[in-house]
Image (cartoon, grey):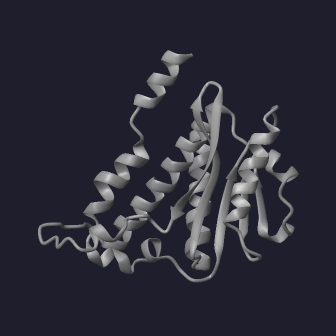
Amino acid sequence: LRRADEQQAQRPSVAAVLSQEFFPLLPPAAHQELLVRGGSAGRLIVVLTSDEGLCGPLHASTVNRAMDYADSSTQWIVVGQRALRFLSVPKERLRVMPMPAEEEAQRQMQRLARAVLAQFTLEQLRDVWLAAPRYLSATRQTVTVQPLLPLPIGPSSAGMPRTDLVIEPSLSQAVEALAALWVETVCVESFWSAR
């Protein structure tokens, strides 16, 4: 198990590569895009648990950490039925997705990413957060809450003048493609870490 933990720690994170290598390439004009600046309407929290299992305290901790980020108008997407035991919100602000089987994970996380992007754009949401267990070792897990949207590109890329950068066909489409890849990647990596 120790060797498996060491190998897991050495695997590169695609989300880290996106944030370190691709986000800085966005020109300052990208900060005007909704997917980068965010809207003003409200918050969406995605909670990743499971449909079954014996990790009740871990799922309770995941929901409790997510609740720390919520207010009375927060909307929820719950992946896995276990979170419903610990989360009491009005049904009109809650959507539930079943926890996908391993062979369906990629496709289900793509569907989740598309749903998150569509809701963020349509409702002009302020932000979207993902609460999920994170694997530390065979005997230890923790709970993380990380931002999905707006894209966490930070102010550093806004201050860099880029005269040599050409974005085809448009900046908006480039930001949309990057946001879709970012949300999907973070969801997929969180799914496998939680497994």
Marker count (numbered) = 0
Name the residue located 82 percent from the left edge and 32 percent from the top edge.
Answer: 54
Q: Is residue 57 left or right of residue 161?
A: right
Q: Quadrant of the N terminus?
A: top right
Classify 139 as above or below 24: above
Residue 169 makes an appearance in the image: no
Name the residue located 55 percent from the left edge and 74 percent from the top edge.
Answer: 121
Residue 31 makes an appearance in the image: yes
Q: Residue 129 occupies which quadrant of the picture?
A: bottom right
Q: Residue 128 occupies which quadrant of the picture?
A: bottom right
Q: Is residue 60 left or right of residue 9?
A: right
Name the residue located 40 percent from the left edge and 77 percent from the top edge.
Answer: 33
The image shows residue 66 at horizontal and vertical percentages of 69, 58
Which residue is situated farthest in the bottom direction here? Answer: 40
Q: Quadrant of the C terminus?
A: top right
Name the residue located 17 percent from the left edge and 66 percent from the top edge.
Answer: 165
The image shows residue 122 at horizontal and vertical percentages of 59, 76
The image shows residue 193 at horizontal and vertical percentages of 58, 37
The image shows residue 138 at horizontal and vertical percentages of 62, 24
Classify 108 as above or below 151: above
The one nearer the camera, 5 or 39, is 5
